[in-house]
Image: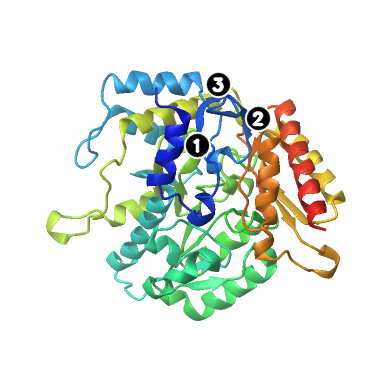
Amino acid sequence: MTSSRKIKSYDLDYIWHPFTQMKEYLSEDPLVIENSDGVYLIDSDGNKYIDGVSSLWVNIHGHNVSKINSAIKRQVDKLAHSTLLGVTNPSASLLAKKLIDISPDGLKKVFYSGDGASAVEVALKMAFQYWLIKEKKNKNKFVCLKGGYHGDTLGAVSVGGIDAFHSTFKPMLFESYKLSSYDSSDSTISDLEDLLKKKADSIAALILEPYVQAAGGIKVAKEGYLKDIRKLCDKFDILLILDEVATGFGRTGEMFACDHDNVCPDILVLGKGLTGGYLPLSATITTNDIFETFLGEHEELKAFFHGHSYSGNPLACSAAIANLEIFEEERTILKVKEIIEIFEDELKEFSGLKHVSSIRNKGLMAGIDLMKDPEKNVSYDIRDRIAKKVCDIAKAEGVLIRPLGDTIVLMPPVSIKQKELKKLTRSIYKSIKEATENES
């Protein structure tokens, strides 16, 4: 077995980590995660850490889940991969049926990709070609929200709204209409209506993250927001794309965030938790209206010319089927509603911390904003690295989290138990208190 020292050496010598300033990373001692158990990740020295952000929001039922493990093992003994171009496989077909069964009424067709950004690209291209086929060529623009995040491919970035992530690539992007973020839900609705009155004939679709802008800092929309959005999209004949890559699979207390308002989008985008956090897989789910628009004779060239080598990968689909079966067998949504109540009670305690300016959550998705002086609206300097200091202290407490700027994000697996949840929240409380008081 390769030693931990060697693994760290290879990592520092050869890996370029995502969303990481490598100059800083190269000066530190890497944490090597080798094992897992439920909501815990285990490092090469045997130390256990609560996975406070679900391994970047993908893990659902915890790690090393026997049912998902077994499903993958059974599948790999039969078929690891076969293309979905022109043929099918049992796992992809069974999963598609299960996804339609749990999706909002009105969605009927599943298109597979490998990750959330790829599934967003599918949604954008489908919406664009949909209107093209309908001979409404001018409907080729997209509306999105400031603070929105839909992935890092160029189409997804074009409908993103986080300057820190996206501004560098502006010359490479197509233009989109950007509305205010969830910080001001009322103005977003009125601004959208004003925009559609003027520009609806040129707009193909609106894309947003329902209820929670995740990477934008866990910004939460007001109740009923989605119903108002759906009404405006219907009124002005534009498609509604809901990106549930982060919010899906129980995170907000319902299977999907749009279920809170009983809203059906024209296109639903899923990823992250689809396989329970095991394997890359995403899905773009559409209505029959959209699907049937693409039907025609071969020579009409109406087909959707888009695909991925690993679309409908049997291993990933088998993991996803097992993930959804656990939801059914263990009544996960009912259980998560109970744990959310405890989570919200725990979050109330953070309001007593001097340097916490705001606390938001929707279900098990929470953001805790840190400021140097909340009363005077004075932020920390970027060089203070206050959130990183919180994370470093939390690591010593046995909790792994990753912040967004000066926002501490908590998004544990939905399977987390009360004891583990309280360990998570109280360790983060202690870490924030220690880090911010040392900076005062």
Specify the label residue 102 is tagged with: 1
SS class of the residue under badge 3? Answer: helix
Q: Which mark is residue 329?
A: 3
Question: What residue is pinned by disc 2?
Answer: 416
Name the residue furthest left: 299
Q: Is residue 23 left or right of residue 380?
A: left
Cα distance in 3D space between marks 3 and 1: 14 Å
Camera-side residue of 413 and 193: 413
- Give the left or right position of residue 248, taking residue 347 as reference: left
Q: Secondary structure at mark 1?
A: helix
Q: Quadrant of residue 1?
A: top left
The residue nearer to you, when weighing 27 against 327, is: 27
Decide which of 72, 321 is in the foreground and name it: 72
Q: Amino acid at mark 3?
A: Glu
Q: Amino acid at mark 2?
A: Ile
Residue 380 coordinates in the image, percent (x, y): 73, 64
Please state which of the two labelled residues, at mark 3 or mark 2, is closer to the viewer: 2
Mark in front: 3 vs 1? 3
**Residues at marks 3 and 1 touching, judged by CB atoms closer than 8 Å:** no
Q: x and y percent of residue 169 in the render?
A: 42, 69
Query: What amino acid is labelled 1 in the image?
Result: Ile
Compute the Cα span from label 3 to label 2. Answer: 17 Å
Residue 334 seen:
yes
Most extreme residue toward the bottom, as rendered? 198
Looking at the rendered structure, which numbered label has been put on residue 310?
none
